[in-house]
Amino acid sequence: MDVRIGMDMRLWGDSVGVAELPQLEMLASLGYAGVEIPLSGQGTSELKLLRVALADLGLVALANTVIPAGSNPIDSSLAVRRRAVDYLKARVDDTAQLGSKVLCGGLFQAQGQLSGVPPTDREWDWSRRCLREVGEHAASCDVKLALEFQSRFDAHLVNTAADASRMCEDIDLENLGVLYNTFHAHLEEFNPARALPAAGERLMLVHLSESHRGELGRGQVQWQETFATLDFLDYHGWLVVQARGLASSGDAVPANIWREQFDSREQLSTDAIALIQHALRLQRQ
């Protein structure tokens, strides 16, 4: 298993820029190889400055985004669906500007926009058409899209690794893949040994997130089984630590975190990479 370890910068909020340089320096010193930057419409100059700062620290840039309600790919309004295409294309452009090769997230629908009923074939087709157009644009920018299946509390269209894999197969673009998030999998899947293989060759990215979104190893996620299955699959790619703190006033979308399950962000970052490195050593023995 050949992997690199990254950190989702949403631990420090949804508006990340050069102001977070001390945090970026801390992560680089701990041995993180990259960071995942939340994109929500930062200016070109801000992205250029961040790209330079990351390069100076030797950190690889990854990117994520959350689709706002007014740009929902599965809305019944054609105008809203077109705004979704435009929004995602703009985030692809931002991803390229940042110097990232990957944009990830629940790109199939606006987060939290639940219908209250099971997903329909029409919604699936609307999402597929949106992602097909955005995926083609991303390919022209040399950007890959990683679709993050999400729990039923965040989305209703794509809830499992198998769902995400099926969406990728339906779209049939080489630059589309599956993001496996242990938090969402803990809520929706039976176990990692069944869920991870369901992503098949489309598995592109893995988010390591605890069941309470806090410190890794102090919740209910099946970490031993997760690493063992990734090793069995000979996974090659990123392992990105994802934790969330109390929402700041700059957060674009509330994470519904009302208490923090860690002592400090620095301690969480230190303990998380130690846990991952230990788990990787055990798999090599």
Image (cartoon, rainbow, N blue to C red):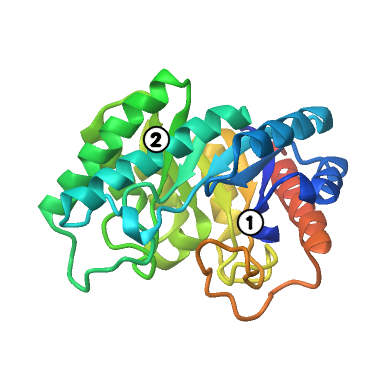
Q: Horizontal and vertical percent for residue 115? A: 22, 69
**Crowd class of label 2 (few under 14; some 14 to 19; many from 20; radius 10 Å):** some
Q: Position of residue 272 (x, y in %)?
A: 74, 55
Q: For residue 116, which quarter of the picture? A: bottom left
- Quick one: SS at disc 2? helix
Q: Which quarter of the rendered picture does the N terminus lie within?
A: top right
Local secondary structure at mark 1 = helix
Residue 122 in view (yes/no): yes
Residue 71 located left or right of residue 266 = left
Where is the C terminus found, in terms of image quarters?
A: top right
**Rendering coords of residue 127 (x, y %):** 24, 46
Judge by depth and name the residue closer to the eye, 236 or 174. 174
Q: Which residue type does callout 2 highlight?
A: Lys
Horizontally, residue 107 falls left or right of residue 94, namely left
Q: Determine whether 130 is above or below 217 in the image.
A: above
Residue behind mark 2: 89
Q: Compared to 20, does 51 lie above or below?
A: above
- Residue type at mark 1: give it: Arg
Provide the residue designation for mark 1. 10
As rendered, which of 273 and 24 lies closer to the eye? Answer: 24
Labelled pair 1, 2 in contact (Cβ < 8 Å): no
User: Seen in the image, is 12 located left or right of residue 226?
Assistant: right
Q: Taking the image as drawn, is residue 59 in sight?
A: no
Q: Is residue 10 left or right of residue 68?
A: right
